[in-house]
Image: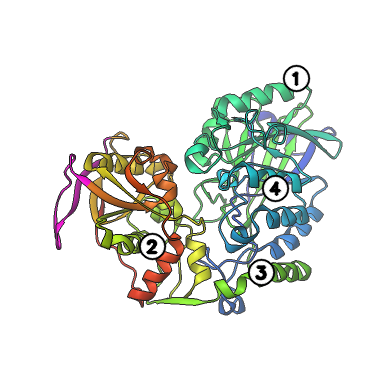
Amino acid sequence: MRTVYVSCAALALSAGLAQADYTLTILHTNDFHDRFEPINGFDSACSAEDAGEGKCFGGSARLVTALAEARARSNNSILVDGGDQFQGTLFYTYYKGKMTAEFMAKLGYDAMTVGNHEFDDGPEVLRGFIDAVQFPVLMSNADVSGEPLLKDKIRKSVVIERGGEKLGLIGLTPQDTDELASPGKNVIFTDPVGAVQQEVDALTAEGVTKIIVLSHSGYELDKQIAAGTTGVDVIVGGHTNTYLSNTSEDAVGPYPTMVGPTAIVQAYAYGKFLGELNVTFNDAGEVISATGEPLIMDAAVAEDAPTLARIAELAAPLEEIRNKVVAKTTAAIDGARETCRAVECPMGNLIAEAMLDRVADQGVTIAIQNGGGVRASIDAGPVTMGEVLTVLPFQNTLSTFEVTGEVIVAALENGVSQVEEGAGRFPQVAGLKFAFDPAQPAGSRVSEVMVLVGGDAWGPIDPAAVYKVVSNNYVRGGGDGYRMFVDAANAYDFGPDLADVTAEYMAKTGPVTPMTDGRITVKQ
């Protein structure tokens, strides 16, 4: 664990803290995605066998224990969340935000920001969640005044007290949430840098000098926010599931990452880690040291028995569904975020092939699945419906429609336009081959687009020809930037659930052997 000093004054003070110095422990989570139960090494459901071998991570019962221990180590602490508590398991499918609210209350959160997935079921479910919790839910870069369900319910910032000191907390959500989720037309998202600075200025005018941003904006954008604003002391991040650490070779960057005087932290996702940042402020409210490391929630962390019992009680209605074995695999199927949002991935191929197989008798020849809709891998052996639902938790339905080859190429350009950011719009495909060059400007990266022209023969896509396509209703409706599909001809968005389609395809073609075949080529 290392100390990050942000000024010469900090070096001078490090030998002995002044009387007025104030220390605060910021405990934090992000992108929890309703993983109340432990996960395995693939971020999917943990089997009894894995649990018995100590190979499981996370779960709310471990967080209860870890938080109690962390709070005991600190004289002042807060617990905050960087967004995306919602969505990801059957618990959300069944309980929506009710179970989330119950467990966040149990863990003792002080505040959270709104993530894009908090809008997956529109303002109504988010409003129910806000009404059920006692802590503030924040979002500074959105105007909700035109949405009756959220007006006066979401605050841009809030001031809380801890240890006799005022702390200003500001929330941020992705500016493109209208593309990523379903906030409706009445919520208007704005630039994060300007929104943060406006709240910083307002808090500073109130005499608040210690300011923490809860940001569901992603690691790279958080660095831009830190560089583009003044007065922000700490950014607690989310959205990109970024692992920061001072000890692991797998880390994307140091914990915290310093940009000027601002400390940026994030703690991967799914409750696998609990972030613990210890910050010391001087009397002027400046950060003079920031140290910490995400704490891994592995088998060494005891699970709280009452919490386990409550989760088991809530899981009872789900057991029959998720324990049903629907298929088998000969090897693990990679559905990792870093793979499926950057290159052809085995899980993406499987899902796209399943979609295409389901509607091939309708003359559909091309399938496109957004990589961000792939949420987990599946390990080798028996596959349960619960595992499939963890991979595809969003209750998306199959959508069929007709567009020209020109529109398909535009869709592929959109899909690879933010690959360097790990954006969820990356296209996993079937019945289609293409190459792209990430070094080229967005909008001119795609080349060599090929489609089946008869049997197993491939030929160049015809920009003027009309093709029948299958995707999911989220993408067809313009999600993840696929607005070129919104006005597609002969669109039907009410097909079967994508998870059911995938499970049935796996059962029909199994045992499943994961594969990639070069349908997506990355040019170097």
Q: Which is nearer the N-term, disc 1 or disc 3?
A: 1
Q: Amino acid at mark 3?
A: Ala
Q: Nearer the viewer, mark 1 or mark 4?
A: 4
The Cα–Cα distance between marks 2 and 1, rounded to whole angstroms, is 51 Å
Mark 2 vs mark 1: give the one in front. 2
Mark 3 or 2 closer to N-term?
3
Q: Which residue is mark 2?
A: 347
* Disc 3: which residue: 315
For disc 1, the marked residue is 205
Q: Is residue 382 visible?
A: no
Marks 3 and 2, how far apart in space? 27 Å
Mark 2: give few (<14), some (14-19) or many (20+) Cα within 10 Å: many
Mark 1 to mark 4 CA distance (whole Å): 31 Å
Distance CA(mark 4)–CA(mark 2): 32 Å
Question: Mark 2 belongs to which amino acid?
Answer: Met
Where is residue 254? Give x, y as percent. Answer: 55, 46
Q: Amino acid at mark 4?
A: Phe
Q: Secondary structure at mark 2?
A: helix
How far separated are the C-alphas under marks 4 and 3? Answer: 20 Å
Name the residue at 33% across, 63% down. 358
